[in-house]
Image: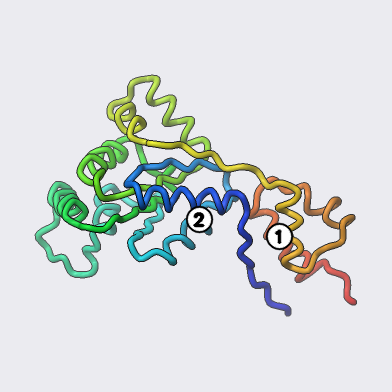
Amino acid sequence: MKKFSQKLVETNNYIIIKEACKYALENSRMIGIFGYEGAGKTIALRKFYEENRQTQYIRVTKSMKTADFYKELLGLESGYGRSYRSLFKIMDRLGSRYFNQDEKNLLIIDEAGKFSFSDLEYLHEFRDRTEKSLGIIFAGPEYFHDDLLMGVRNRVKGLPEFYRRLNFKIWLERPKQKEITAICNQYGIEDKRLLRNRFFKHENFSDLTNDIEQYLIFDKPED
């Protein structure tokens, strides 16, 4: 069976995410990036992380507790010892690390929609400790922004303060036909009728890539 290799295409969303990461890194800003599932957030964020040594990437999971997040950020598994068992000590160590560094750093938090509102209170505290030398990219789904805004309007403890610390909020766009065409062309799919009848219908980049793979592996007529 033929093997499918995913290709990186610099869509408008990819470029926007890259520029937001660069700006947050250079200016120590906290930027919220909100987009539908399949908008290409993770691919773009991980690519920026891989290409920039001052960057740390953490993807939030459902099973991750508050302390787990900050332990991963501190790198306790790398040997910081047993003295950092309490969240307060971990937070204090993180604040000292970033406060004392001469160069700028960036923390990318992917799948931030899995954070609870109480988790955001800790992130608010962490932000206050590191705002001079650490940029933060806070990426999550569109509905998470709606939940945040509702929490702000209802004066949920800690949310108005956290939301105010998001210096910018960026919303990602749905695929445009010219982007779908460019992506399909990268895989050798150029037939205009095929593009129009099959691929233009997709409303996110993830489904588009999956359909391209299915077409190339299973559906493409033999030459």
Circle 2 sits on which residue? 42
189 over 198 or under it: above or below: below
Lateral position of residue 190 relative to residue 70, left or right = right
Q: Nearer the viewer, residue 73 or 98?
A: 98
Give the image location of residue 198, x and y in percent.
82, 53
Give the image location of residue 114, x and y in percent.
41, 44
Name the residue located 74 percent from the left edge and 51 percent from the top edge: 178
Give the image location of residue 130, x and y in percent.
23, 46
Name the residue located 39 percent from the left edge and 64 percent from the top edge: 52
Residue 83 figure quarter: bottom left
Circle 1 sits on which residue? 183
Q: Which of 213 and 185 is in front in this view?
A: 185
Q: Is mark 2 on a helix, strand or loop?
A: helix
Query: How are the colours assigned in the image?
Result: rainbow
Residue type, label 2: Thr
Lateral position of residue 59 relative to residue 207, left or right = left
Q: Nearer the viewer, residue 32 or 152?
A: 32
- Give the quadrant of the N terminus: bottom right
